Amino acid sequence: MFHSFRPFGKFDLDKFFLDMKLKSSLLLFSFVGIVGLVIFTEALNPFQKPEPNPQKEAALMQALLQGLNRLHFQPKVLDDGFSKEVYHLYLKDIDNSKRYLTKADVEQLKQFELQLDDQANAGTFQFFDLSMQLFDQALPKTQNWYREILGKPMDFSKNDLLEADGKKLEWAKDDAELRARWEKWMKFEVLSRIVEEEQKQEKADFKGERKTFAQLEEEMRKKVLDTYEKRQKQILKMDRTRRLETYLNAITNVFDPHTGYYSPREKENFDIQMSGKLEGIGARLQSDGEKTSVTEIVPGGPAWKEGTLQPKDVIMKVAQGATDAESIDVMGWEIDDVVAKIRGSKGSKVTLTIRKADGMEKVITITRDVVIMEEGFAKSLMLNSGENQDKVGYIYLPKFYADFTPQGVTSCAADVAKEVEKLKKENAKGIILDLRGNGGGSLRDVVQMSGLFIENGPIVQVKSRTKTPEIMSDNDPRVQWGGPLIVMVNGFSASASEILAAAMQDYGRAIIVGSTGTYGKGTVQRFVDLDNATGDDSVKPLGEMKLTIQKFYRITGKTTQLDGVTPDIVLPDFYNFIDIGERENDYPLASTTIDAVPFKQNTYRIGNLDKLKTDSEARVASDATFKKVNDNAMRLRKQKDQSQYPLQVEKFRTWNKRQDQDAEQFENLFLPINGFVLENLASDMPQIQSDTSRIARNEDWLKDKKKDVQLYESFRIMQDMIRNTVAVGKQ
């Protein structure tokens, strides 16, 4: 089995091609938060390239600059220094691996290095146009190269090395050097697959045909070629509008990493993710570049109710309404364009021509409706050890979701309050709130949620660039949960998660448990409708800009920006030795402090935190699984630091074997924890048992949590809090 790290990130994250733009999933908005899906109204045929619209592009640029200048927390002067920053960030975004542009290409672009501020102010795009021209020239050239390279047997006898980190490479001096770079990548791709297949063949239970090295080499060249050809098709489908987004985001990201441009399609996707609902048929799709297939049917949704559409079905044609007379063939389309055709308003109909797994074709009509993506919502369990210990409630919150539409009713604060009430009814003696991996979301909701655990008082300070800090407080004197509380975090807990963890830590209301620190995002974003910046209806819609307008601070006056929240009790984590977080972004805002505000709480006092910490450290030190987690974290750090890979077959085999041996130590690292009992709440069972897919997802979740050593240690800390080392009462 090929266990070793393959540096595809250096390849697959060529932002220009595969993502076009990496949106931060770590937000704090007037809302604080997250992600992307796909929607739109009526998508163009993806093979139709829209003509450039200089008037619209100029209006879009001016609207962006106006918003950045007037509203950004820390506006920049658009001068030569700014231009230089945009220039270098854009080049990094479009050719991170340095496999498309040569030194001569970059020299052509360099003439504009100090002119991008002037072009932005003028609403012109000479630099961007030239970059696209150079890429359009590079695409057929590089395609011919990889076809030539993969079209004949490869020589793996030379002592070559692949340098996978573009930052460690200079721009190729000419096409010959650039082609040599491609040849090394192709050799690595093929060789890694050959060795993987060799390992499979060496196993005693292997039942297939055992092939020679030459046979495997030929087969893997064909597979790699197929992969690159599909990728090339995706590239060619990208129109100027999508390419332009990368350039616009290089401009906005120089202000800070969380300020960015959202096209109308992307903004709608964002709203869906934040609200956890959409209007459509309730089916998740995926694409292999040629066909779009169903991966999951959302329980309770329109497709689930209709009953015909199933996972693995292929979407062949889409028609609006209850007839297939106007069906459009969507084979080969990009997935977001397919989704755009299928989604639509509640009550409308869509007709799909599908191919079932057995090859049969069917035509079905589905009435669209509101679809709730419940797996993104708060949910809870009851934990115990089977040792006559007190039951502990567990609440998992994947994000601080909220529906920001006027009619919106979705609220993670309200949902967590409901989960707390359910846990109280089932006699939980303590609650663990899990914010691991929670990238943030609604600022309103994090303030309300924090108020569930204290009588009243300040939660967070929010400061605009020119105003005195605003204190956002819980004004409700009610305490929904006044007992022991643990908040779990990790390096991917960001923004709103950090606000809640920091507030509970500052009040001494909860023990924060997790990895060495949280993400370190202490900024607030707001969406600005760019259409408001112009009266010219002919250029609309322009889209929206997510804009950093404020920084938030702890009630102590300290910030989480760059610094994050340091847990009271640190547990081993896979990422403990890997640099992640806000500090790793380009152009993050600085860490600053402001004055503290008065605060107190009379709900709960944590007693003897030092002993709780010492006892936990002793358990962790003697726990074999935690030791392996720590050792694996060190292994992952070494892999991350490696950027060179041997291309000589024997050296590659030796290197790979060593990687496999290292990885094998950590196979089956997480096993079900003996005596750790996790149970669904009685009130949740009717919904869980209403559908086989819900049952299956719940079973998988329970299995996963039963292996969660960090959760189990948090449970043990909670038992100590409940039984031995904590005093409950008024301060």
Image (tube, rainbow, N blue to C red):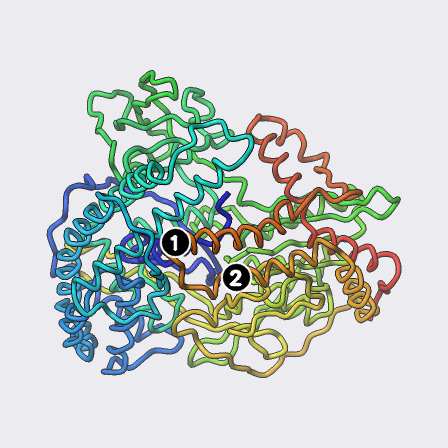
User: What numbered label is drawn on residue 443?
Assistant: 2
Q: Nearer the viewer, residue 722 or 87?
A: 87
Q: Decide: marks 2, 1 in contact (CB < 8 A)?
A: no
**Helix, strand, or loop for circle 2?**
helix
User: Could you tell me if residue 495 is visible in this image?
Assistant: no
Instruction: Give coordinates of residue 107: x percent, y percent.
Output: 16, 74
Q: Position of residue 49 (x, y in %)?
A: 14, 47
Task: Indicate the amino acid at tag 2.
Answer: Leu
Residue at figure coordinates x 29%, y 36% from the top left: 338
Q: Which label sits on residue 8?
A: 1
**Identity, as a three-letter code, of the amino acid under mark 1:** Phe
Q: Is residue 305 visible?
A: yes
Question: Up-down: is 82 above or below 233?
Answer: below
| Residue drawn 54% across the image and 60% down it | 636
Q: Nearer the viewer, residue 514 or 34?
A: 514
User: Earlier along the polypeptide chain: callout 2 or callout 1?
Assistant: 1
Side of 641 relative to 155 (left or right): right
Could you tell me residue 340's position as x and y percent?
A: 30, 39
Query: Few, some or many C-alpha atoms within 10 Å of disc 1 (few <14, some 14-19, many ≥20)?
Result: few
Is 364 situated left or right of 136 in this image?
right
User: Is residue 274 positioned above or below 280 on the image?
Assistant: below
Q: Position of residue 269 (x, y in %)?
A: 37, 48
Q: Secondary structure at mark 1?
A: loop
The CA span between labels 2 and 1 is 36 Å
